[in-house]
Amino acid sequence: MATGLVSLADRHFQEACTAYQQMVSRDSTDYVGWYGLGECRIRDSLVIRDPASPSGWSFRSSYGAAADAYARALRLVPSTHIAFGDTAFDRLSRLLFTERNVFCQGHVVVDSIRFGAFSSLTHDILAFIPYPLEEALGDQRRVPATNVEAVRHNQMTLRAVTDAWLEAFPASPTVLETHALVLETSGAVQSAGSPKRSALDAVRDARRLTRDSVQALRLAVAEARLLLKLGDYRGARAIVDSVLSAVPDSNPSLAALLVGPALLVGRVHRAAMLAPRGFADSVMDFTLHERDAVMAPTWALLAYSSLGRPRDSILALRQRVNAAIDNYVAPERRELARAATLDEQAVEAFPELGLSPRHRSGTDRNYLLRMQFKYARGDRAGARAGLESLWVARKGWPAWAVSIDRTYLEAALYTDLGDTAAAVQVLDAALNAPLNLDTYALAWITLPGNLVRAMALRARLAAAAGDRPAATIWSNAVLILWSNADAEFQSLVDSMRALAVTRPPH
């Protein structure tokens, strides 16, 4: 054990793995041995040349074997959840690769090239093929066709872990919360009368048992998200209205949890105020001094841009971010800083505001920037070809595997191009399978508002096509969620009211 720990500390990962392998060879129930094997394998991020690999590279370690070792250890000692605390699901999902956006990173010794890889599955064996990081994240073809299948496999592995935890600690709110998240990722959302089989039941039990204010808010948001997935928009909004009324904005831990719910119900000014507090410590490639000056307006800008309005606030905050970068970031790093802070907001606001300066200077970094730029400059064929190439690269993916913010923005561009059939297909794949919304659907800034924007676009397309049932369903959904939204959204709400056959009560 000492040899393993010292080797881990010295980053001698192969020696550490040898020590831990000896431990589990002597005792197959040795928790420390199995957890150590997970650690030494997952920390070994070295990438080596491999002519047999499709990319020409492979990881020296096996991340699939790391996930297996962690799972074995965590089932052996359910009390591990106490050490993990309220980060249990986040840590487990990253250790076991149970979310679509989780990927592993690597490096080579001789230079500074960084690598990334998403999980794949071959004959029930988890594998990772590394590509240079920019290519891995920016080229849809580098996401394996079996990625969704691999994630499902990993989710079932994690469910076996939390099943064991719940068996040992049935009244622990932390275990119930973690188990609920695992059930949610596998689609077991609907109440089934048992917290072991239903995410909704597990969350409600955890809310009843917790005495921690941060966990209580997190669980309330989780219940709202589950109700949203079940199409109970009134139930979701009631919880969101309750927490927005009852929870103060001053606590940064609580502020981060309130941003997404505020955006879901169209309270964009509240979200823009909360976002700089809630996400102040998010990891960015800035020094502390730069981050304080640049990131506060950036988070507010992203909140406004995720709903495409109000226009004046977006334009003013763009100027603030640009000025902060000029004043606080070294000249050689300014373009990198602008890409990190301004590219995504430009993409988000494009349906309402059109081209931004980032569309001209950042076209190589973001696929939607490139396509939006082509469309706005009259290259409709180029924009259409770019969209179509995405689905060639995503061959084998279910359409819902694309996050809801990308779904909306791609559908909006299809609509601008006049291809409403493609827009409807993209929107329906996501909106008609709400159980597949991400567990962070109310956590990350760009997701909640884009979900409602997608609903509104689908209602408009349905009305234009004479599809009254679909127009009614989605316009009513928007009315329920946004009927008490900020004033800037009332024109949209009025347009939805005109499309709704049955008007829901406020």
Image (cartoon, rainbow, N blue to C red):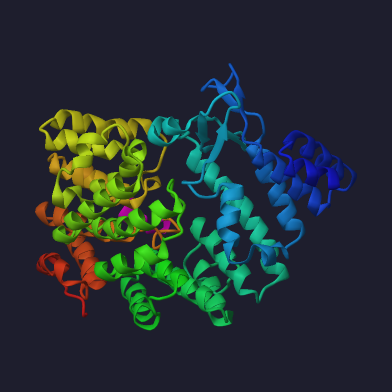
Q: Nearer the viewer, residue 142 or 133?
A: 133
Q: Position of residue 414 (x, y in %)?
A: 19, 41
In the picture as drawn, the residue positioned furthest to the top comes out as 51
Residue in the picture at 61% in, 34% down:
123
Q: Where is residue 138 in the image (x, y as percent from the top left)?
A: 38, 34
Vertical placement of residue 195 versus 93, above or below: below
Q: Which of 310 and 231 is in front in this view?
A: 310
In the picture as drawn, the residue positioned furthest to the right comes out as 26
Question: Would residue 120 be seen by someone viewing this image from the given angle?
Answer: no
Q: Where is residue 406 in the image (x, y as percent from the top left)?
A: 31, 47
Q: Where is residue 394 in the image (x, y as percent from the top left)?
A: 38, 35
Q: Is 402 left or right of 57, judged from the image as shown?
A: left
Question: Would residue 466 be seen by someone viewing this image from the given angle?
Answer: yes
Vertical placement of residue 217 versus 18, above or below: below
Q: Is 386 left or right of 337, judged from the image as shown?
A: left
The segment highlighted magenta reads 430-437
Per the image, is 431 magenta?
yes
Instruction: Please tell me whether the stretch drawn in magenta is mainly helix, strand or loop.
Output: helix
Vertical placement of residue 361 versus 340, above or below: above
Per the image, is 118 magenta?
no
Quadrant housing residue 183: bottom right
Quadrant housing residue 243: bottom left
Total number of numbered labels? 0
